[in-house]
Amino acid sequence: MMTSCILCGKDSVLSRALPVCLSCIRTHPEKALPLAEAVHRRIKREYAMPETPPDRGVLCGFCVNDCRIEEGYSGYCGVRRNTHGSVMPRSGSEDTAFVECYYDLLPTNCVSMDYCGERHSTTGKNLAVFYESCTYNCLFCQNWHYRTVSGTMSVGELVSRVDEETACICYFGGDPTPQIMHALNVAKRVDVRVCWETNGAFSRNLARRVGRTAFASGGTIKFDLKAYSDSLHYALCGASNRNTLSNFTYIHEQFHRREPPILVASSLLVPGYIDEKEISDIAQFISALDPDIPYSLLAFHPHFKFSDLPCTSRELAYGCLEAASKHLSRVGIGNPWLLT
């Protein structure tokens, strides 16, 4: 929908939830970001979660938000909590998580499937593990309902779901990071391929452990590179992307593997906020590491606070595809059926 930017007054495709145009976010972040922060505060308050990363108390140290949490309070994710001086999940233990799971027959429809080690499998199944938590506050989140669910599973319960027909596990969400010890503990106890879909905002220590798990099992780590500009990333997601870009580089350097690739990247083509320039910048960042790293461009479908935006147009998608293909050899549109 066409909406007037509240800073420059120009009409463009914008959501009422964030009526600040891409040009103003890029050129006037000092004006745009306080407006974006107010949006994120309001949404976090709506779900009874901390409005900003707390800065007093015990350091959590799990992600880019660097929450310092006082006794009895939670971090920005709403899941990690200071209990008697120790930061742990609200579930009461790193071995119990807010999570649900289901099986998908192989080959699955996951973003990395075209490059996955199971891409030629015609039998067996994947165990999809959905962690009901996240370190971000993306305005376009397609799985926003994680904020309202509370079912738990222990490490042992999840391990028991890995049967003889299970070829691989894929951790996603939300994001696995706030409850990542649960995921890592499960991975230690199973002998299957372990893949991750993540925003990559975890700490360097956790990046090392995620990389080791995927590398040793033949799995892939799919990073959601939501924006290259840190200002734009904050406006859309309520958090910095500095850990994401740093960890992407680190995992490539420390766990390099071409087939199946250790890394796959994806970006959501959000109308009005992500354009050819942003995708070109992301593609150049990836290419500087290795131009053969797969990159999937994903069509946007209205969700959460951006439910008033249109689906990605063919014009935008193929313009972004052309921009990315100038720098990378393995680029595609992951869900072209959503294009309008």
Image (cartoon, rainbow, N blue to C red):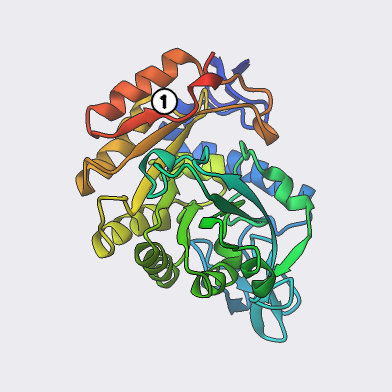
Q: How many marks?
A: 1
Q: Residue at x 34, y 24 (%)?
A: 321
Residue situated furthest bottom in the rendering: 84
Seen from the viewer's position, the closer of residues 136 and 311 is 311
Seen from the viewer's position, the closer of residues 140 and 40 is 140
Seen from the viewer's position, the closer of residues 148 and 61 is 148
Decide: is 208 above or below 13: below
Q: Regarding mark 1 in the picture, which secondary structure is present there? A: loop
| Quadrant position of the N terminus in the picture | top right
Decide: is 189 above or below 84: above
Seen from the viewer's position, the closer of residues 231 and 216 is 216
Give how far across and how far down residue 236 sits, in percent. 55, 39
Q: Is residue 122 left or right of residue 293?
A: right
Residue carrying label 1: 275
Q: Counting other residues with Cα less than 10 Å from the Cα at mark 1, is it few (<14), some (14-19), or many (20 or more)?
A: some
The amino acid type, in three-letter code, at marker 1 is Asp
Q: Residue at x 41, y 42 (%)?
A: 119
Give how far across and how far down residue 49 sits, in percent. 73, 57
